[in-house]
Image (spheres, grey):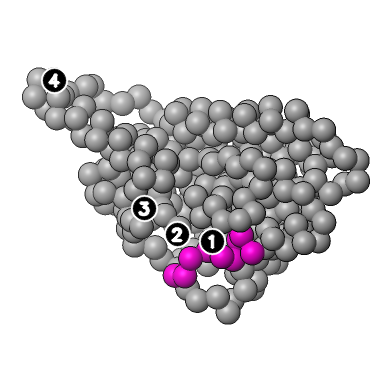
Amino acid sequence: MALRIPRGALASSLLVVLLVSLVHATNAREPPRLEMVTSAAPPGLTGSRARAAAAAAAACASWRLGVETNNIRGWYSIPAECRGYVSDYMFGDRFRQDCAVAAREAAAYAETLELAGDGREAWVFDVDDTALTNLPYYADTGFGAQPYNATYFDEYVANATAPPLPEVLELYEKLLALGIKVVFITGRHDYQREPTVKNLRSAGYHTWEKLVLKPSSLRLGSSVVPYKSGERQKLVDAGYRIVGNMGDQWSDLVGTPEGDRTFKVPDPMYYVG
């Protein structure tokens, strides 16, 4: 499926020019990257209009904080007035800095671990918007302001072109170098295994211990917490020690066993309970 050009209504609302491209490196080991180029913002507003715009931006920033701290739950779409704010954040320096902080702290923690040497330490990663970024899909669907389109998202997954989240990919490489095994537990369904494997490998995730996908029998819309925590329990029962767990949703991280440490990358575009 070719990526569709963002709808006119979305394009007119953005204050930045978004350029999404996959750059194929000459080195076969180097993954495609998501390149984001922004234009200069138009001249600023003045007076009461400037104050109103600043107040709206502050309100959206507070809303995003509530989402990231799990104080705001059960929401289905971003506030309409925050669509421009979310798009600017996701394609701006702040998002990359926030991801870098999470990945840096995770790497610093991993480097302090004293491994047993039996190869049973494991780190769990979510896939969507953690190992891979679905910004191309969300740029075309209002950054979470439009209802979730399952058919279109399935087509996007089948295309297997989601770029890696660079900070997470760098963490992944560090974990492997330390001798920690990587396990992916994703909310993608089991019938999506082939494109998921293809996408992970093309993005640079060349090695993993397990890739766990959600059974198609699980009811759509049900909580993923029992599924993900249950799969982590299976790892523990099999003798693995989950030293770390990273995802973009709180539902990736809660539920026993969580892992010794959890790390969340930001995602204000959607909520998965």
Q: Earlier in the sequence, mark 4 or mark 3?
A: 4
Q: Is residue 222 above or below residue 202?
A: below
Mark nearest the camera among 4 and 2 is 2
Distance CA(mark 2)–CA(mark 1): 7 Å
State the SS at label 3.
loop
Q: Is residue 237 left or right of residue 66?
A: right
Residue 101 image point, x, y percent? 56, 28
Instruction: Tell whether label 1 touches label 2 (CB within 8 Å).
Output: yes
State the SS at label 1.
helix
Q: Residues within 10 Å of mark 4 (few under 14, many from 20)?
A: few
Mark nearest the camera among 4 and 3 is 3
State the SS at label 4.
loop
Distance CA(mark 3)–CA(mark 2): 8 Å
Instruction: Tell whether label 3 touches label 4 (CB within 8 Å).
Output: no
Residue 23 image point, x, y percent? 63, 40
Q: Is residue 249 left or right of residue 105?
A: left
Residue 228 image point, x, y percent? 60, 61
Q: Amino acid at mark 4?
A: Thr
Mark nearest the camera among 4 and 1 is 1
Q: Residues within 10 Å of mark 2 (few under 14, many from 20)?
A: some
**Where is mark 4, residue-wise?**
46
**Where is mark 3, residue-wise?**
73
The magenta segment is: 221-230
Q: Earlier in the sequence, mark 4 or mark 2?
A: 4
Q: Residues within 10 Å of mark 1 (few under 14, many from 20)?
A: some
Q: Is residue 90 above or below residue 52?
A: below
Q: Is residue 50 left or right of residue 202?
A: left
Was residue 222 drawn as part of the magenta stretch in this picture?
Answer: yes
**Where is mark 1, residue-wise?**
225
**Where is mark 2, residue-wise?**
273
Q: Earlier in the sequence, mark 4 or mark 1?
A: 4
